[in-house]
Amino acid sequence: MSRRPYVREVPPTAWYFRHPRYLRYMAREVTSIFVGAYCVLLTVGVLRLAQGQASYEAFLQALQSPASIVFQLLAFAAASYHAVTWFTATQKAMPLQLGDEFVPGGWIAGAHFVGWGLLSAAILYFAGVF
Amino acid sequence: MKERTVQLEVLRYNPDTDSEPHFQRYEVVCQDEWVVLDALNEVKETLDPTLNYRWSCHMAVCGSCGMMINGEPKLACHTFLRDYPGVIRVEPLAHFPIERDLVTTPDDFMEKLKRVKPYLIPKKPKPLEAGEYRQTPAQLTKFRQYSMCINCMLCYAACPEYGLSPHFIGPAAITLAHRYNQDSRDGGRDERQEVIATQEGVWECTFVGACSEVCPGHVDPASALQQVKILSCFDWIGEHLLPGGKK
């Protein structure tokens, strides 16, 4: 009898097809690309604004192109998924203990969702949407 | 009592004769209330005495019988056959070397467990005659959940980070470090932070969350690791950005 442990290699990519939880994780990570790209878009907007009115209006015009609208819809969906997954995770990262008991996790995640909703409403208000 | 014939597909590996593992199928007559471990015991007793696997308590306490059941890390004593209508594929825990059949080599985990010093390190030595350490229910609540770990290593088998980067200290060991760091009787946090607040420690974790989903003790290692990250950030801010920091 001899020891000869057999090591199974983990495939560098295919592992996330093994279970839906890994695909959900990868989906959450991929949404970061859209969130990052939208940040770049906002930065370009600020630069155009600094360059003057004509430049900024051309930027606004470009935002209304079909390709831009498709990108913005995708970015919105991705950012929403990203936000939901992270706000749901806050109950794990930031548990709150009051006395002998922990506050239910749903309250912590819920408080983040309420904050998200209030801030979004405030931004839309100042943007003149309502 | 209801009986049915269950097909088990078990990964076999004999280091003396096999160059690589292979599957072997067994047909076992099982009772409806049996768990996978009962079926393996039936195989060993009646069909194939050469089959190797670890088990001890048969009640999800000892953490010995962790294995992959249809690709999912499970305790074989805690997994009912009736929940699996088709062929049940049984493999050794993923991400650990296979010693023989379903027996894996836990040396890497044991070494990491040792490194995080999972025991009380008193703030200052206290003689026995000074009496016991007292703790309020609130102080116990703070870490109790994390003390439920049975070292079954299912979280390591579920963690893709550990599979891809084996130097990662991993969910259970970091959770146990956090458990002692949160204990009001303990003064060893600085020593443990040297090990866990590092690249191969908590910063290797990307919060997949699989560890918590498979944990049979509902320990929720993912929460412990995220809390260690936040507390480590506070340490860094205190040391580097606030006046009077250590560095």
Image: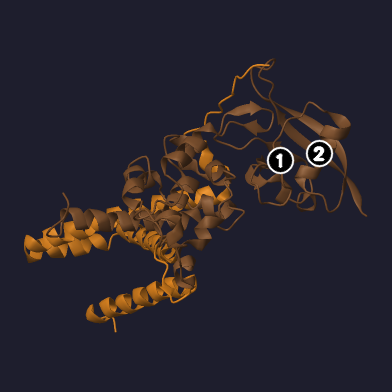
Chain colours: A orange, B brown
Direction from residue A51 to residue B91 in the image, left or right: right
Q: Are marks 2 and 1 in contact (CB under 8 Å)?
A: yes
Q: Residue at 41% of width from left, 55% of height from top? A: B127
Question: Residue at the spot x=51%, y=49% of the render?
Answer: A23
Q: Nearer the viewer, residue B2 or A84?
A: B2
Task: Provide residue B144's location: percent of width, then percent of height.
Answer: 51, 62
Q: Chain of mark 1?
A: B
Is residue B236 among the parts visible in the rendering?
A: yes
Residue A67 seen in this snapshot: no
Q: Nearer the viewer, mark 2 or mark 1?
A: 1
- Amino acid under disc 1: Trp
Cα–Cα gap, marks 2 and 1: 10 Å
Q: Is residue A6 above or below residue B177?
A: above
Q: Secondary structure at mark 2?
A: helix
Q: Which residue is the site of mark 2? A: B41
Q: Which residue is mark 1?
A: B55
| Three-letter amino acid code at the position of disc 2 | Asn
**Where's the C terminus of chain A, which quadrant?**
bottom left
Give the percent coordinates (x, y) of residue B104. 61, 32
Indicate the secondary structure of the residue bearing disc 1.
loop
Instruction: Please give the chain letter of the residue carrying mark 2.
Output: B
Residue A117 position by quadrant: bottom left
Alpha-carbon neighbours of circle 2 within 10 Å: few (<14), some, or many (≥20)?
A: some
- Residue B57 is left or right of residue B120, and the answer is right
